[in-house]
Image (cartoon, grey):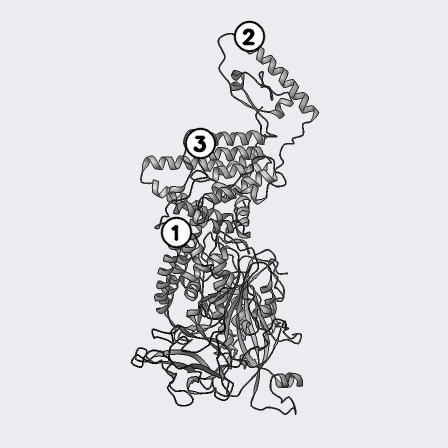
Amino acid sequence: MIEDKGHRVTDYFVVAGLTDKSTPLEQDLSETKSSGPKAPITDLAVINKSTGETVPEGFTCIESTYTGQPANLNHGSLKSPELFLCYKRGHGKPPLSDIGVLYEGKDRLIQGCEVIQATPYGRCANVNNSSATSHRIFITFRRSPPVQPQNSLAVTDICVIVASKGEIPPHTFLKVDKNLNCGMWGSSVFLCYKKSVSASNAIAYKAGLIFRYPEEDYESFPLSESVPLFCLPMGAKIESWAPNTRYPLPVFSTFVLTNSSGEKVYGAAVQFYELYPVENLSEKQKIQLGLLTAVDKKPILDRTVNTNKCICLLSRWPFFKAFKDFLMFLYRLSANSVNPLPIEKHISHFMHNVPFPSPQRPRIMVQTSAHESIMLSQPVSTPLPLSGADYSTLLKNLGPENCATLLHFVLLESKILLHSLRPDVLTGVAEAVVAMIFPFQWQCPYIPLCPLSLAGVLNAPCPFIVGVDSRYFDLYDPPPDVVCVDLDTTTIYLSDEKRHCSWKNLPKKPCKSLINALVNLHHQLTIVRQNAPENSGAVEMTPIEADFSWVNKMAGLEMEVQEAFLRFMASILKGYRSYLKPITQAPSEKATAADSLYDLQGFLKSRDRAHQKFYSQLTKTQIFIRFIEECTFVSDKDTGLAFFDYCIEKLFPSDKGTDKGTKVEGECSEDAKLLELDESQKSEHTVFIMPPEPPPDDGSEPPPKYSYKSFPRLRLELFDRPRELKPALGTRIAGASLSSSPALLAKRTKQEVKLAYKMAKRCYSNPPQWAKCLFSHCYSLWFICLPAGVRLAQSKPRAMQQALNVLVKMRNTEVEVLDEVCYRVVMQLCGLWGMPVMAVRVLMEMKKAGVEGNAITYGYYNKAVLESPWPSRNRSGHFMWTKVRNVLRGVAQFKQALRGSAKRPPPITTVVSLDAIADGNIPSMLVAGDHLVHPAVLSTFKVFDYRDGHTV
């Protein structure tokens, strides 16, 4: 095991691919589609059956739609010819890459497209059913170039839908949004087509670990055995390619793992192809790959055999852009180049010599070569959980309304399947999907990029969020109860049972504000992306200033999209803290049940009656129940929950102090800013890290050169040993979350410090207000120092009673409470020294002062009353005899008070513990326990039993 020493940019470097121990990737044949991956479509034709035209040889005619309607392109028309679309599959010519519809005279033909102007029999292929005087409509297509990469996309399926009959595009199909019938009569007919990777002769195996660095595991983060499966989610393949097939460009992908402690681990991988030696293949494999004929076993020439391999970086920080640049740099080094340094030196330099960004050095510029550099920026420090979310990609690929619909399904814990042919998109979108429901935390299975070998999770009986490569649907049909989100066609596919569910089921006002904000941000993102600095290769570099400016704009828009979702969540949950039920007596077995912790019925009654169904469903979800538990008890989410409470107060200042049971109808403050970039994020202070230096040329022997034709088998002896890095100032222990709960006594959260600073800045110019502010801070400082005082005090109950008296004095003298640290410290001390009854009294005092505790304070209160020993309810014999003695003494004092002189002595108020009474340390006058006493005596003495919290 390697000892953890502060933050690291990256933890592991992994090479995954085909190994000697790889086993064939098994598929569940009971669920696999019988057809499997289809050959690409190479030709289209339109035939006129009204004139007796038949299907051309080798073509397949689309006779009907998927619901059984006739697939006549003039469906529902009167006196119009019956036109049908035919297609042909094969590998003999370049496949089609796109299909379209051309309105003659209105549209301009896109370059590279061909028009089907005539049927195979020479008749006009106009598919418009209107009169001859109107414009004609033709079907167009675009063909792929003759020489294309192996993993290029092609049209693999096509269908016709009749929208007038309620038909929608099938799953994974893209709709050509142009009606084929423009006449007054006839149905609305549309073309749909599907794109996928062209099928080839291939054998898939489970990916294995080829190499890892370092060899030993880190203590807090051991390398998972499943990493190779996520590096190559579709498996390690041996493929046979046709002649003139170009090598595809490397494919970048990202994934997220969860370790044993629940912490996220981010992976960035680059997949590429290399030649595979034919001599390593068995005869059976050669037949499967099409290298031998099946009957006479004759070799088929001019075919190359290749295999895919992957290089990967694993880290606890989502530096996806920097990791992509570095992995691409390593790939280019391995591609037919001669270098003065081995690849191993570059890997160890990046892993060991690049410091972690910090507030003092927010930007790290890593120079990898004379023309290439990598930028690392400090993660945005907010109270929200750390995430690799890419909100801008989510909004770009789904649009405003689909984003709101997806939010509805996530809040109600549906089975959600994200899929795309772009693996680098899936993880960022999936992270955004689980982050947009903050303060809720997704509690069910979550796999942003699911390997094909683990796809059985889609049949799980519980909710999940899973991302898969769209090629999964070439092999399997999605389960019927799953919400399929196609990021390539910007559509959400729903089953018939969920067809009525959409963003319109969300609360009206918050949803309207969300949609308006997302529409505006979608427009801004489109403009900013158009002005993005182009990736002009390794030689021509974008100026650093321009790159910084664009990155800052994107970061600002990213935060605005995140804030739009945060506003929505604050709007639907406002006033929720009023229905938390504090524990005020010795806890029972049911004390931690959801019904005992929260007034669900009261919460539902306070919501809009028109959306009771939504709120009722929401309160039954696991995310809501877990949210209530985290608000009630101390957890690592306390800082984030306290920030969420602050957001509600900022958005709805008029609702603060609203009584429980009243409707929450306050208007949202549109100008309130919830998320802001940290000052370090605005800094342009950059640290430059130079590339590793080649060995000096001393003249005796020429320095070695390293040449590669493919990615080499790495050697451990060529890696440099790590050097000690100075930890960044102000950083936490490795693995600590940005939203970790304050573990020490008397610790303010970052948000509370920021608010105190803003208040001081506001009061500084007004002397009376400034004096009150300083006076309040004096009390806060006294309570911050209280833990040390209580620790040194001989009598802990007396010291705690003094602290409670100070809190009472603050309320009576109307001292303005700046934050909750005064009450929080006393509650923490109650838990530390086992005084649950005192904690209850502090909570009541806090409510009297009009202070509503946030998640941190409330969590420490419940920790004190749950974990501290409560006084026993079983009265011992000694206690009962002591009580009889107290009663007799009380009666005696009763008589003495009645016989006393007319001049009554001034009342003296004190608090005496029953423990002290039992030991005989009592004043001259006492109060009888449960018996009726004279009001004069009762107002004079009050005896408080710290063991059961009752006044006797």
Count of all numbered marks drawn on residues in the image: 3
Residue on which disc 1 sits = 509
Residue position for label 3 = 810
- Per the model, the C-alpha gap separating discs 2 and 3 is 40 Å
| Amino acid tagged 2 | Arg
Residue 262 appears at what percent x and percent y? 58, 56
* Depth check, front residue: 952 or 134: 134
Q: Circle 2 — which element?
A: helix
- N-terminal-most mark, 1 or 2: 1
Marks 1/3: CA–CA distance: 40 Å
Q: Quadrant of residue 282?
A: bottom right
Disc 1 from disc 2: Cα separation: 71 Å
Where residue 451 sits, quadrant-wise, is: bottom right
650 shown above or below 481: above
Q: Is residue 260 left or right of residue 770?
A: right
Looking at the picture, tell me which residue is in the foreground, 787 or 126.
126
Q: In this view, does 936 lie to the left or right of 546?
A: right
Q: Quadrant of the C terminus?
A: top right
Q: How crowded is mark 1: few (under 14 residues within 10 Å), some or many (20 or more)?
A: few
- x and y percentages locating residue 803 in the rendered image: 51, 32
The spot of residue 543 in percent (x, y) is 36, 69
Q: What residue type is labelled 3?
A: Met
Q: Determine which residue is flagged by label 2.
A: 899
Amino acid at the residue labelled 1: Lys
Give the structural element (helix, strand or loop) at label 1. Answer: helix
Q: Where residue 530 appears, x then y in whole percent?
A: 35, 69
Q: In which quarter of the image is the N terminus?
A: bottom right
